[in-house]
């Protein structure tokens, strides 16, 4: 009996030491938390399987290999037909989602930074224009913006009365028709020279930044960089015999043929998501700039720097530390808000695999899992990139 009591006391002392140790206790809590999460997920998955079996459904993703049987009007990257599979439809929807998110992030960033700086202007008119844009846009639901822009786009002229820009660009209620580049056999040389010129510019800018940190001397390399890219690209273009022709849209019958057709749904969604998100980015930029001490402006003025150079070299680099974290949240919001595309018929991930495929196959659980996990992965990738960019642009104190 004494041996048993001694053994139990020894066990309690080991557990007590582990629990009283801060690091050990932290590891134990994490292990228990993970175990509870997996147990909860197992229970949920078991209940799903049992409930689906009770109504005569099985939990599987076999439907992805079946014929989709529906058309997708906008598929710029893949040749998709109604005889394609649900998996191919999901890929088309994913690519359309990534396309609208990428284009929207770029345009929203440009508009947001412009209006954010305009909000700080001493000019009364410019300041109030930016103020009205920001306050009106961000206080109206995003869905209404999408429907409003789509309503404007579909009221554009028919193809026979299209808005014509230099006989090459045509704006109609069926979309924007633009020339399509068609590359010849030596076009890869032009592409290679373009990539080489970009690499040279990156090396040049890196060298210039290091030299600036060491000596304080700033070399005007912007126009030098532009010249390198233009000369390398155009030089290789002419030396290879100009291996490029343009397929210009032409009106044939009731619609345009040739070139590239940008669907009105894409245009409406792109513009609405961009300027809506830009209204939030503008406030982020404004608050980031205001967070920089006024003494920085005064010191730059005392050194003879112009306002534009002060903004470029002193204010923006310091403000970016404050701007980037909430900016990442806005990029995530824009990507997730793109799921509202189904309201105007833009065939994104939700409209394809989470919409038509769901209704045709009756696989509600499986399709929703695919959609949820896809948006989760996209969001994690955006967050990881923005975290990396935040670390890369952080100011280093010396």
Image (spheres, rainbow, N blue to C red):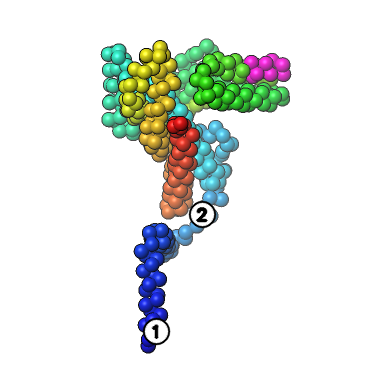
Position of 145 with respect to 393 (left or right) is left
In the structure shown, which secondary structural element does the residue marked by tag 2 occupy? loop
Q: Quadrant of the N terminus?
A: bottom left
Position of 255 with respect to 31 (left or right) is right
Is 336 placed above or below 310 here? Answer: below
* Residue beneath disc 1: 4
Q: Camera-side residue: 224 or 112?
A: 224
Q: Nearer the viewer, mark 1 or mark 2?
A: 1
Q: Camera-side residue: 251 or 315?
A: 315
Residue at the limit of the structure toward the bottom, as seen here: 1
| Percent x, y of residue 61 | 51, 54
Point 66% across, 23% down: residue: 193
* Residue beneath disc 2: 61
In the image, residue 236 lies in the stretch drawn in magenta: yes
Question: What span is colored magenta in the figure?
Answer: 231-240
Sequence order check, earlier mark of 1 and 2: 1
Is 51 placed above or below 125 here? Answer: below
In the image, residue 373 lies in the stretch drawn in magenta: no
- Rounded to the nearest angstrom, the CA distance separating label 1 from label 2 is 55 Å
Does any portion of residue 273 appear in the rendered image? no
Quarter residue 236 falls in: top right
């Amino acid at each position: 009996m004494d041996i048993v009591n001694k053994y139990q006391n020894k066990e309690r002392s080991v557990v007590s030491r582990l629990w009283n140790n801060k690091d050990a206790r932290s590891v134990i809590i994490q292990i228990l938390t993970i175990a509870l999460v997996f147990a909860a997920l197992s229970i949920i998955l078991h209940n799903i399987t049992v409930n689906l079996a009770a109504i005569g459904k099985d939990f599987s993703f076999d439907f992805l290999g079946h014929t989709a049987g529906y058309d997708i009007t906008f598929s710029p990257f893949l040749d998709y037909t109604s005889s394609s599979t649900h998996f191919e439809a999901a890929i088309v929807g994913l690519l359309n989602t990534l396309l609208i998110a990428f284009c929207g992030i770029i345009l929203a960033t440009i508009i947001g930074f412009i209006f954010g700086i305009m909000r700080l202007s001493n000019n009364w008119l410019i300041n109030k224009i930016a103020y009205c844009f920001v306050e009106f846009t961000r206080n109206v639901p995003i869905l209404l913006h999408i429907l409003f822009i789509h309503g404007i786009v579909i009221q554009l002229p028919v193809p026979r009365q299209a808005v014509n820009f230099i006989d090459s660009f045509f704006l109609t209620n069926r979309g924007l028709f633009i020339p399509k580049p068609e590359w010849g056999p030596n076009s890869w040389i032009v592409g290679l020279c373009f990539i080489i010129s970009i690499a040279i510019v990156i090396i040049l800018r890196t060298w210039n930044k290091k030299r600036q940190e060491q000596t304080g001397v700033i070399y005007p390399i912007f126009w030098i960089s532009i010249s390198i890219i233009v000369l390398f690209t155009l030089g290789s273009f002419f030396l290879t015999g100009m291996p490029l022709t343009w397929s210009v849209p032409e009106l044939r019958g009731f619609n345009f043929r040739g070139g590239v057709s940008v669907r009105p749904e894409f245009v409406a969604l792109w513009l609405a998501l961009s300027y809506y998100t830009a209204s939030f980015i503008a406030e982020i930029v404004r608050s980031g700039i205001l967070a920089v001490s006024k003494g920085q402006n005064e010191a730059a003025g005392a050194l003879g720097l112009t306002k534009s150079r002060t903004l470029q070299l002193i204010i923006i680099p310091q403000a970016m530390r404050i701007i980037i974290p909430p900016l990442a949240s806005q990029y995530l919001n824009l990507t997730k808000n793109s799921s509202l595309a189904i309201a105007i018929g833009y065939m994104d991930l939700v409209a394809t695999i989470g919409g038509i495929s769901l209704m045709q196959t009756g696989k509600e659980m499986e399709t929703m899992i695919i959609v949820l996990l896809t948006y989760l992965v996209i969001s994690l990738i955006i967050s990881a990139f923005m975290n990396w960019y935040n670390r890369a642009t952080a100011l280093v104190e010396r």
